[in-house]
Amino acid sequence: MTTSTAAIPVTLKLYASLGVFLPSGSVRNEAKVSVPNGTSVEALLDQYGVPREACHLVLLNGIFQPPASRGGVILKSGDAVAVWPPVAGG
């Protein structure tokens, strides 16, 4: 069985200090990006240089993705990945 390498559209949302990793032209902490079919959540974040230790809360279509499973969850066309860094303050 062969896997298509065609690009699929996904939405990448990076909040707070992570916004600096979004591609130019992003609006309101959100960017429509294309990734190769078969890309994992972790690979998407790696592609944009988002440090793994800064990815505290990662949601795929609103569902929490624990760190241990992010490398195995494969994105589908139209998916939305939202990421927040650890919260600091007091």
Image (tube, rainbow, N blue to C red):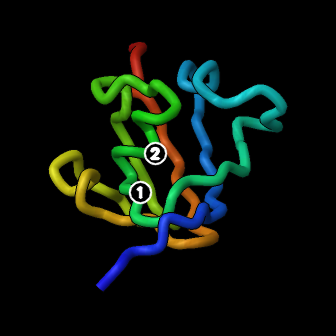
Task: Answer left or right for 29 relative to 79.
Answer: right
Q: Element at badge 1? A: loop
Residue reaching furthest to the bottom = 1
- Quarter of the image for residue 19 reads top right
Question: How far separated are the C-alphas under marks 2 and 1?
Answer: 7 Å
Q: Element at badge 2? A: helix
Quarter of the C terminus within the rendering: top left
Residue name at image x 44 percent, y 38 percent: 45
Residue name at image x 54 percent, y 24 percent: 18
- Quarter of the image for residue 65 reads bottom left
Residue reaching furthest to the left = 68
Quarter of the N terminus within the rendering: bottom left
Q: Examine the rendering and report whether any part of residue 74 can be seen.
A: yes
Indicate which disc, 2 or 1, sits on the residue closer to the N terminus.
Answer: 1
Q: Position of residue 67 (x, y in %)?
A: 22, 46
- The residue type indicated by label 1 comes to Thr
- Quarter of the image for residue 24 reads top right
Question: Is residue 89 placed above or below 3 in the rendered structure?
Answer: above
Identify the residue under disc 2: 44
Residue reaching furthest to the front = 2
Q: Position of residue 64 (x, y in %)?
A: 35, 59
